[in-house]
């Protein structure tokens, strides 16, 4: 659904009729504060996720160990 400037004007007129011109600065401040808090919370979550991803140990490829092969040869046989 495309956004048209006419729709914005209609919404603003409806808000002006409902709340009146005296309350518009209050409403604008409340909306601005809510947007700042949302932006702050989302950036904190993003930072926590990126820090957690950086702090996780990187999986190391399994190293071929000669200890496994030598330990099976070093065990005495039961017979």
Image (cartoon, rainbow, N blue to C red):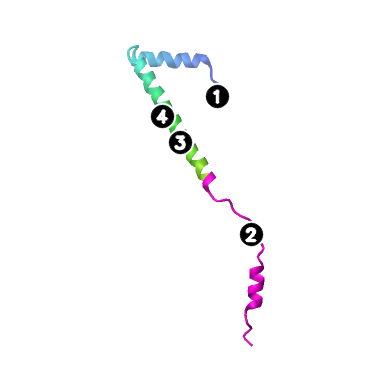
Q: Residues within 10 Å of mark 3 (few under 14, many from 20)?
A: few
Is disc 1 placed on a helix, strand or loop? loop
Q: Residues within 10 Å of mark 2 (few under 14, many from 20)?
A: few
Q: In the figure, 23 relative to 49: above or below?
A: above
Observer-side mark, 2 or 4, equals 2
Q: Which residues are magenta?
A: 54-79
Observer-side mark, 4 or 3, equals 3
- Residue under numbered circle 4: 37
Q: Quadrant of residue 62?
A: bottom right
Q: Residues within 10 Å of mark 1 (few under 14, many from 20)?
A: few
18 vs 37, nearest the viewer: 37
Q: CA distance from mark 2 to mark 3?
A: 36 Å
- Residue under numbered circle 1: 1
Is residue 18 at all visible to an observer of this figure?
no
- Residue under numbered circle 3: 44
User: Does 4 sit left or right of 38 as displayed?
Assistant: right
Q: CA distance from mark 4 to mark 3?
A: 11 Å
Q: x%, y% of residue 15?
A: 39, 16
Quarter of the picture holding the N terminus:
top right
Is disc 3 placed on a helix, strand or loop? helix
- Residue under numbered circle 2: 62
């Amino acid at each position: 659904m495309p956004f048209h400037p006419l729709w914005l004007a209609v919404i603003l007129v409806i808000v002006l009729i409902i709340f009146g011109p005296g309350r518009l600065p209050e409403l604008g401040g409340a909306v601005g504060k809510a947007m700042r808090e949302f932006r702050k919370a989302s950036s904190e979550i993003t930072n926590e996720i990126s820090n957690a991803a950086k702090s996780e140990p990187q999986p190391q490829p399994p190293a071929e160990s000669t200890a496994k092969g030598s330990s099976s040869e070093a065990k005495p046989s039961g017979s």
